[in-house]
Image: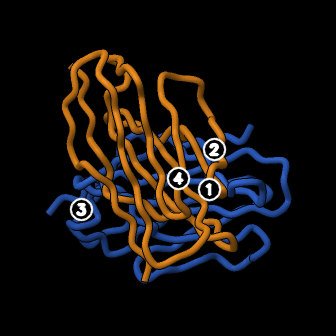
Chain colours: A orange, B blue
Amino acid sequence: SQTIHQWPATLVQPVGSPLSLECTVEGTSNPNLYWYRQAAGRGLQLLFYSVGIGQISSEVPQNLSASRPQDRQFILSSKKLLLSDSGFYLCAWSGIALYEQYFGPGTRLTVT
Amino acid sequence: AQTVTQSQPEMSVQEAETVTLSCTYDTSESNYYLFWYKQPPSRQMILVIRQEAYKQQNATENRFSVNFQKAAKSFSLKISDSQLGDTAMYFCAHGEEAAGNKLTFGGGTRVLVKP
């Protein structure tokens, strides 16, 4: 069966520091991968998605970037964090023939 | 751009009773997919139910069922025999057959099941 991992689970970082969040999927090949951000009590905002290695589409211009160095690995990064980057970050995957997405446990990021 | 609207920010229901959550969406496509996700306090997003637009029959998963009205672009979720573990945020989502199979989510409805 497929599983999706995210780490770290919780992160507290000062303003101006770099960021790297990692997401990996097991049990499937060539998945579509997604990064979302969720503000407290709000819906999900799609940040990036990827349909293959090295292929990244950005949905919202911002302080963040994404990379996909391997088929089942998706990384969310920032060179300098802003206070507004605080939130709950969710990674998700879907299969080529699937339309539903399956989510990881999320990372709670607090920028101080 | 697709939009998904959940007009009920919060709902409460007594244990064992039924609650219905509303969702409307906007699309120009004829074939698409609709989903309900549950997010309990742990914040893990869990797929509850899916509906393909080309299917007229409403989807059912145990105590969860949908009322899909394609012409009205409406997709409501009914939770029957509500249980305390159903307390969560519920998100409606819409997806289309396009590059990346992206989903558009509604703003969510908080459901509180009272004992």
Quadrant, the C terminus of chain B:
bottom left
Residue in the foreground of this view, choosing between B101 and B108: B101
Q: Secondary structure at mark 4?
A: strand
Label 1: chain letter: A
Dot in front, 2 or 1: 1
Residue at 62% across, 44% down: B4
Residue B12 visible from this viewpoint: yes
Residue in the foreground of this view, choosing between B73 and B3: B3
Name the kind of residue labelled 1 in the image: Ile
Dot in front, 4 or 2: 4
* Whether label 1 touches label 4, CB < 8 Å: yes
Residue A31's x, y, as percent?
A: 59, 66
Give the residue at mark 1. A53
- C-alpha gap between disc 3 and disc 1: 48 Å
Residue at 57% across, 65% down: A94
Dot in front, 2 or 3: 2
Q: Are marks 1 and 4 on the same chain?
A: yes
Give the residue at mark 3. B14
Q: Is residue A80 above or below residue A51?
A: above
Circle 1 packing at 10 Å, graded few (<14), some (14-19), many (20+), is: some
Circle 4 packing at 10 Å, graded few (<14), some (14-19), many (20+), is: few
Q: Are marks 3 and 1 on the same chain?
A: no
Q: Is residue A33 left or right of residue A4?
A: right
Give the residue at mark 2. A56
Name the kind of residue labelled 4 in the image: Pro
Name the kind of residue labelled 2 in the image: Ile
- C-alpha gap between disc 1 and disc 4: 6 Å
Name the kind of residue labelled 3 in the image: Gln
Give the residue at mark 4. A69
Lower sequence index among marks 1 and 4: 1
